Image (cartoon, rainbow, N blue to C red):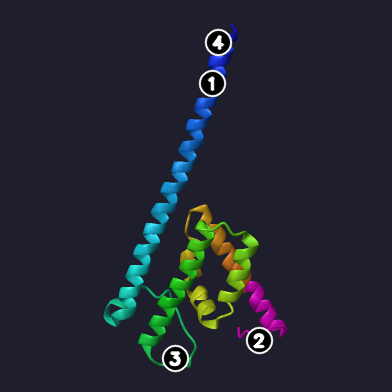
Amino acid sequence: MWIDIVQTAVLSLTLVAIFLQYLALRRTIEVHLRTTLRTLHLSLLEIAMRHPTLASVWPLHDFQLSPDIKDPTEALHRHLYANLILSHQELSFFLGPSSEEDMRRSLEHVLSSPAIREYWQSAKLLHSKRIDKHSRKFHELVEDVCQKLSARTVGGTTGVKG
């Protein structure tokens, strides 16, 4: 009888260990796939920034930059670069051990740039359609930080232009 209890306990612990290994492996594969996809995204944007004729293939989401930018190539490059910056932040949020509060502080710094906020305003509808929970949470953080920066700008408590 005791031998059966011990065997059952050992078998149960073995199954728990296998399940935990499965979860760890699944997370490792997910991180690898997401990192690979971001690397491809980076490569595509780098090519677009080097070759304006290829850059024109990217959709611009009704994007408009500051009126002081007259050169369409410069405007497109700024749009693509802002995309890269926010994509980097999103990957950091997904991979990093940092807390949500750390990411919020990082986003406050990044989004203090009017060009990045302008990019976000033009692209947020597209980004809001993402279905995975990490992307959705990241985009909620970006939107929250943008709204708070805008409120501070309107209230005159920051030097950030809205």
**Residue indicated by mark 3:** 69
Disc 2 and disc 3 in contact, CB within 8 angstroms: no
The residue type indicated by label 2 comes to Gly
Residue 46 sits above or below residue 21 on the image:
below
Q: Amino acid at mark 3?
A: Ile
The residues bearing labels 1 and 4 have C-alpha atoms spaced at a distance of 10 Å
- Residue sitting at x 50%, y 27%: 15
Q: Amino acid at mark 1?
A: Val
Q: Which residue is mark 2?
A: 159
**Does the CB distance between marks 3 and 4 fall below 8 Å?**
no
Q: Nearer the viewer, residue 126 or 33?
A: 33
Between 106 and 69, which is closer to the camera in this rendering?
106
Image quarter hosting the C terminus: bottom right
Q: Which mark is residue 10?
A: 1
Question: From the viewer's perspective, is the residue at label 1 or at label 2 nearer?
Answer: 1
Say which quarter of the image contains residue 47. Answer: bottom left
Query: Whole-Å distance between the Cαs marked 1 and 2?
Result: 63 Å
Label 2 vs label 3, nearer the camera: 2
Q: Is residue 67 left or right of residue 43?
A: right
Dot 3 or dot 4, earlier in sequence: 4
Span of residues in magenta = 147-162
The one of 107 and 152 positioned closer to us in this rendering: 107
Q: Residue at x 59, y 59 (%)?
A: 98
Q: Which residue is mark 4?
A: 4
Precedes in sequence: disc 2 or disc 4: 4
The disc, 2 or 3, on the residue closer to the chain's N-terminal end is: 3
Secondary element under disc 3, as helix, strand or loop, is: loop
